[in-house]
Image (tube, rainbow, N blue to C red):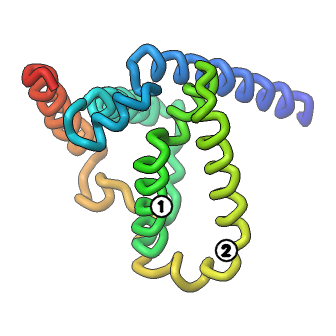
């Protein structure tokens, strides 16, 4: 039994590695590893990043729901809280704005050979992870628990079957994507 589980883990790790390479390649091809594109997004002059993200959200949302509907995957939403989401988003946003990369784009940019991503981005990620590990025990039961909302998903929030949320949201996001593209942004 353990040999079977070990083999499955190796397959999962291998698939993760291959999908990670594909993800980085697609990020690079989409142009979102370019500092100027990311800064253009932050300055609201270049919407390449939003287009890539909307495409990924639509594809992921529909794909995961198809797999879930076929019984091929089981979702395990994590509990959340405003005390973790708001500070986490602010820290992420500050790092993104200062460096011009997020974790996915920094990994792709390192693969491209960009030294700013290697030294600034990877150093920032490691420093942030270390700082979080140091601070976490002190804030785990206080700040991070403020405004807990449990294992919330949009279908559970709206008390609706998943497809009744996935289809309209996908159509709305696709419409937004079409508008962005038509506007030449």
Write down the residue under mark 1: 91
Q: Which residue corresponds to the image point at 9% horizontal and 27% vertical from the top-left?
A: 179
**Residue 144, which numbered label?**
none
**Depth check, front residue: 63 or 42:** 42
Residue 169: x and y, percent?
20, 40
Task: Examine the rendering and report whether any part of residue 22 can be seen.
Answer: yes
Left or right of 93 in this view: 157: left
Query: Mark 1 and mark 2 in contact (Cβ < 8 Å)?
Result: no
Image quadrant occupied by the N terminus: top right
- Badge 1: few (under 14), some or many (20 or more) residues near its Cα, within 10 Å? few
Residue 103: x and y, percent?
55, 41
Write down the residue under mark 2: 135
Mark earlier in primary sequence (2, 1): 1
Q: Secondary structure at mark 1?
A: helix
Q: Which residue corresponds to the image point at 40% horizontal and 49% vertical from the top-left?
A: 97
Left or right of 121 in this view: 130: right
Q: Is residue 29 above or below residue 114?
A: above
Residue 23: x and y, percent?
52, 23
Q: Is residue 101 above or below residue 55?
A: below
Q: Which residue corresponds to the image point at 68% horizontal and 24% vertical from the top-left?
A: 17
Q: Which residue corresponds to the image point at 66% horizontal and 82% vertical from the top-left?
A: 138
- Badge 2: few (under 14), some or many (20 or more) residues near its Cα, within 10 Å? few
Q: Secondary structure at mark 2?
A: helix
Residue 54, image quadrant: top left
**Depth check, front residue: 139 or 116:** 116
Residue 87, image quadrant: bottom left
Residue 145: x and y, percent?
51, 79
* Separation of residues labelled 2 and 1 (CA atoms): 14 Å
């Amino acid at each position: 039994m353990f040999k079977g589980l070990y083999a499955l883990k190796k397959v999962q790790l291998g698939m993760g590695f291959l999908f990670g390479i594909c993800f980085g390649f697609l990020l690079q091809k989409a142009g979102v590893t370019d500092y100027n594109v990311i800064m253009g997004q932050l300055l609201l002059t270049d919407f390449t990043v939003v287009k890539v993200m909307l495409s990924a959200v639509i594809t992921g949302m529909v794909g995961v729901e198809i797999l879930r509907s076929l019984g091929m995957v089981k979702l395990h939403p994590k509990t959340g809280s405003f005390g973790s989401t708001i500070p986490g988003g602010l820290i992420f946003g500050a790092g993104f704005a200062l460096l011009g990369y997020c974790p996915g784009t920094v990994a792709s940019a390192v693969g491209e050979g960009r030294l700013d991503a290697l030294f600034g981005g990877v150093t920032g990620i490691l420093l942030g992870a270390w700082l979080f590990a140091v601070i976490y025990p002190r804030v785990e039961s206080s700040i991070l628990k403020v405004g807990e909302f449990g294992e919330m998903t949009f279908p559970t929030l709206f008390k609706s079957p998943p497809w009744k949320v996935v289809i309209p949201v996908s159509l709305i996001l696709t419409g937004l994507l079409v508008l962005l593209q038509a506007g030449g942004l």
